[in-house]
Amino acid sequence: MFLSRRTTHAEYFDSPECSSDEIRNAYRQLGRVNHLFKFAHPFEFHLPRLLGEERCGRLRLLDLGAGDGSLGRHLERWAQARGWIWRVTDLDLKLALLGPDNNNRRVAATALRLPFRDESFNVVLSCQMAHHLSSDPEIVQHFREAWRVARDALFLSDLHRNVGLYALVWFGTLATGCSKRLRADGLLSVARGFRLADWEAFAREADIREPKISVYLGTRILLRARKCRA
């Protein structure tokens, strides 16, 4: 059955042949798609509920697979409008592809071996990065490392593999004028996405305690977990 199994076909924009200029142009196009699909809303809605609003006044966050850093910039502005101070560190494999320098809070590294001490950040988050990893063991290692460096909470989000989302991505990338290659990669991203049982297994193998795993509006898988503190 269509999309019943997760594909392992690599996306073009993850390939070594893809140039930095192509990737930067893809991020500009993705910005239009992300705006259409309100990519930051799960974090805006759930983070204050996960932590409690009284805890949101001042936070250090780490965004894994940050891409051009747009999520972190958006969340900092969103928090500032509420009188909160959030400082997001962006981490991605290639520093040159990250967004504008935000007071040296940009790090080039792999999410599989984070260059931080245990519990270095109040919140560790990731948006649609896990499906880019090449194998289930890598995804488990990504979950384990993210949990390790989180002090208060972990919040991971990725695509929920289903026909409805496939159709939405087809329409959204076409309506926002994305290139043919990016439209193809968008559909492939859905095919590389996940089901609830996948993330439940990953979280269990990564020893994440009492995770809450759910589907958000039929489009994304969310994992939220609080660290119990003495």
Image: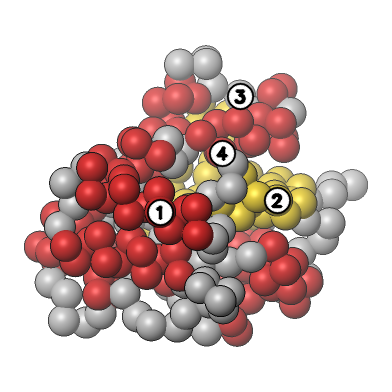
Circles 1 and 2: CB distance less than 8 Å?
A: no
Which amino acid type is marked by label 1? Ala
Is label 1 in a helix, a strand or a loop? helix
Residue 153 rendering spot, x and y as whole percentages: 69, 48
Relative to 13, say whether 46 is above or below. Answer: above
Q: Rounded to the nearest whole Å, what is the CA distance between mark 1 and mark 3?
A: 39 Å
Under circle 3, the secondary element is loop
What's the distance in space between the residues labelled 4 and 2, CA to CA?
11 Å
Please tell me whether mark 4 or mark 3 is closer to you in this view: 4
Residue at mark 4 to residue at mark 3: CA–CA distance: 19 Å
The earlier-in-sequence mark between 1 and 2 is 1
The kind of residue tagged 3 is Gly
Q: Residue at x 72, y 68 (%)?
A: 197
Q: Residues within 10 Å of mark 3 (few under 14, many from 20)?
A: some
Question: Marks 1 and 2, Cα distance to the nearest angstrom?
Answer: 21 Å
Q: CA distance from mark 2 to mark 3?
A: 26 Å
Check disc 3 and report the residue beneath it. 57
Q: Could you say where residue 8 lies in the image, as x and y percent from the top left?
A: 45, 83
In terms of secondary structure, where does tag 4 sit?
helix
Q: Residues within 10 Å of mark 2 (few under 14, many from 20)?
A: some
Compare residues 119 and 189 and report the one nearer the observer.
189
Number of the front mark, 2 or 3 = 2
Looking at the rendered image, the disc whose residue lies closer to the viewer, 1 or 3, is: 1
Residue hosting label 2: 214
Q: Is residue 146 above or below residue 89?
A: below
Q: According to the image, label 1 marks what residue?
A: 167
Question: Residue at point 31% right, 74% down?
Answer: 11
What numbered label is drawn on residue 42?
4
